[in-house]
């Protein structure tokens, strides 16, 4: 059973789950940015940051030399091969990856979720060089998979600018929080996201393996080796 925040209602039944031999285990934290109610526009978010991070924001924005365009279903279909290759560029270089998406995943998700699923493409001289995706979940904006051409990543600071664009999207559309998920935690904290502990309940059908599954999972779960940043105060 996964993934749950520490204050989710399922923990009310933890005794019952333990009786049924479920093991409670900590997972990687989820990075979440809470959108302050005073941020009515993106410039309010920037103004809330300390000087060091305002300068960082300005520098990154100046480096971004792309055309940004949201793709509808037809656009996603048209660029599907490039989108998948850009996704694979990032996925294949991830330090930990449990699965690979099928090639038409983004097309299928757009067909299913329609306007709740957004894919924003970054174009340079008419060529798609990067993209990010979002899922609108009521008052929560969930970031999803992204991809980019490594050749364009550094000169455009693509990844950092994508994180900033996600913030702007969330503010402009009135979301209360942005879920940035569990990768690249330090850079996500630098745009204001905070780590929120997550837990899961595990059970193996083999009784002997179930007795040690918690210890095995703890060994597999990456240890925190990153420094949390705070753009709204002192690090």
Image (spheres, helix red, strand yellow):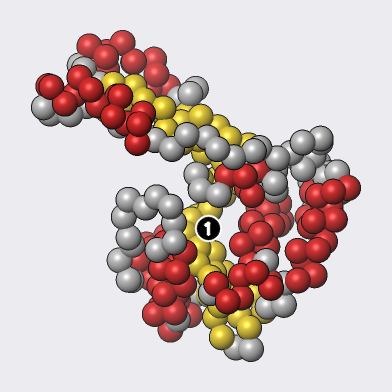
Q: Residue at x 35, y 36 (%)?
A: 220
212 horizontally vs 144: left or right: left
Depth check: 8 or 162 in front?
Answer: 162
Residue 150, percent across and down? Answer: 55, 72
Residue 142, percent across and down? Answer: 53, 49
Q: For the N terminus, which image quadrant?
A: top left
Depth check: 149 or 95 in front?
Answer: 95
Check the image and report above or below for 9 versus 59.
Answer: above
Check the image and report above or below for 28 versus 208.
Answer: below
Locate residue 225: give its quadrant. Answer: top right
Depth check: 176 or 145 in front?
Answer: 145
Q: Residue at x 56, y 86 (%)?
A: 127
For mark 1, does the 10 Å Cα neighbourhood hold few (<14), some (14 to 19), or many (20 or more) residues?
many
Q: For the C terminus, which image quadrant?
A: top right
Say which residue label 1 marks: 134
Locate residue 210: give its quadrant. Answer: top left
Locate residue 69: give its quadrant. Answer: bottom right
Query: Can residue 176 be seen here?
Result: no
132 horizontally vs 191: left or right: left
Q: Residue at x 50, y 63 (%)?
A: 146
Depth check: 158 or 79 in front?
Answer: 158
């Amino acid at each position: 059973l996964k993934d749950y925040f520490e204050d989710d209602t399922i923990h009310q039944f933890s005794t019952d789950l333990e009786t049924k031999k479920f093991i409670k285990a900590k997972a990687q934290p989820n990075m979440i940015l809470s959108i302050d109610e005073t941020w009515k526009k993106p410039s309010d978010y920037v103004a809330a940051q300390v000087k060091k991070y305002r300068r960082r924001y300005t520098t990154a924005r100046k480096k971004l030399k792309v055309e940004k365009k949201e793709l509808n279903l037809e656009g996603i279909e048209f660029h599907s091969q490039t989108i998948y290759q850009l996704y694979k560029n990032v996925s294949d270089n991830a330090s930990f990856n449990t699965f690979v998406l099928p090639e038409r995943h983004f097309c299928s998700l757009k067909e299913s979720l329609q306007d709740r699923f957004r894919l924003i493409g970054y174009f340079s001289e008419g060529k798609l060089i990067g993209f990010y995706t979002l899922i609108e979940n009521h008052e929560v904006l969930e970031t999803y998979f992204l991809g980019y051409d490594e050749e364009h990543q550094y000169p455009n600071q693509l990844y950092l600018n994508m994180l900033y664009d996600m913030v702007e999207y969330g503010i402009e559309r009135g979301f209360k929080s942005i879920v940035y998920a569990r990768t690249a935690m330090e850079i996500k904290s630098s745009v204001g996201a905070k780590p929120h502990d997550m837990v899961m309940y595990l059970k193996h059908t083999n009784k002997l393996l179930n007795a040690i599954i918690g210890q095995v999972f703890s060994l597999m779960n990456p240890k925190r080796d990153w420094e949390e940043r705070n753009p709204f105060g002192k690090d």
